[in-house]
């Protein structure tokens, strides 16, 4: 399955060397709790993913990744959120420029860097 990950120039070297390894998934704003997963999307546009407001420009680069659609570490965000987030946390994520959430996926694992043939 072809998905995309948006990132900044500041993160490219680490991604090239180590792959996609870390992403913050807020599970409760009040308790400052979360999980680690890689954020992916099927959207070819960086808009509506809550990428604004960072010190770095997370809209600068779009990386294409291939993930096995049958991998049990891959979750469509909406399905995972319904099972793991309360409605207030979901609303806060969506209100923070997250209007494109229907295109999001979470990968609870490591997406290795591409290797030249």
Image (tube, rainbow, N blue to C red):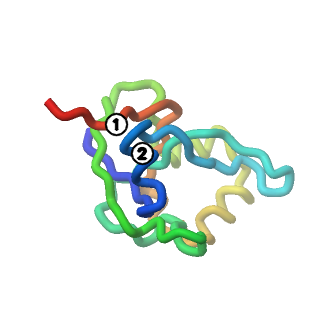
Percent from the top left, x then y, of residue 90? 65, 57
Vertical placement of residue 99 versus 114, above or below? below
Q: Quadrant of the C terminus?
A: top left
x, y percent for residue 77:
51, 47
Q: Nearer the viewer, residue 8 or 29?
A: 8
Quarter in which the N terminus is drawn = top left
Q: Secondary structure at mark 1?
A: loop
Q: Quadrant of residue 37?
A: top right
**Crowd rating for badge 1 (residues with CA inside 10 Å; few <14, some 14–19, many 20+):** some
Q: Which residue is mark 1?
A: 113
Side of 63 where 22 appears, left or right: right
The correct choice, above or below, for 116 with respect to 49 in the image is: above
Q: Residues within 10 Å of mark 2 (few under 14, many from 20)?
A: some
The location of residue 45, given as percent across then percent down, is 33, 67
Instruction: Tell me what residue is drawn at x 50 percent, y 38 percent.
Output: 21
Q: Is residue 55 left or right of residue 62?
A: right
Q: Secondary structure at mark 2?
A: helix
User: Can you tell which quarter of the image residue 112 is in?
Assistant: top left
42 lies left or right of 100: left
Disc 1 versus disc 2: distance between alpha carbons?
7 Å
Q: Which residue is mark 2?
A: 15
In percent of the image, x 55 and y 72: which residue is there? Answer: 97
Q: Is residue 62 above or below residue 64?
A: below
Name the residue furthest left: 117
Do residues under tags 1 and 2 come within 8 Å of each other at their CB atoms?
Answer: yes
Residue 12 vs 70, above or below: the answer is below
Q: Residue furthest toward the right? A: 31
On residue 103, which mark appears? Answer: none
| Residue at the image point whose x is 54% and y is 73% from the top | 52
Q: What x and y, as percent, mark residue 106?
A: 49, 42
Q: Earlier in the sequence, mark 1 or mark 2?
A: 2
């Amino acid at each position: 399955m072809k998905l995309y990950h948006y990132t900044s120039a500041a993160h490219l070297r680490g991604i090239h060397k180590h792959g996609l390894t870390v992403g913050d998934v807020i599970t409760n704003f009040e308790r400052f709790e979360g999980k680690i997963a890689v954020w992916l999307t099927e959207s070819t546009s960086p808009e509506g993913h809550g990428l604004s407001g960072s010190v770095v420009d997370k809209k600068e680069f779009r990386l294409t990744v291939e993930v096995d659609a049958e991998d049990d570490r891959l979750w469509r965000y909406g399905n995972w959120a319904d099972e793991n987030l309360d409605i207030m946390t979901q609303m806060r994520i969506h209100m923070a420029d997250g209007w494109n959430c229907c295109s999001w996926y979470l990968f609870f694992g490591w997406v290795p860097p591409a290797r030249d043939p």
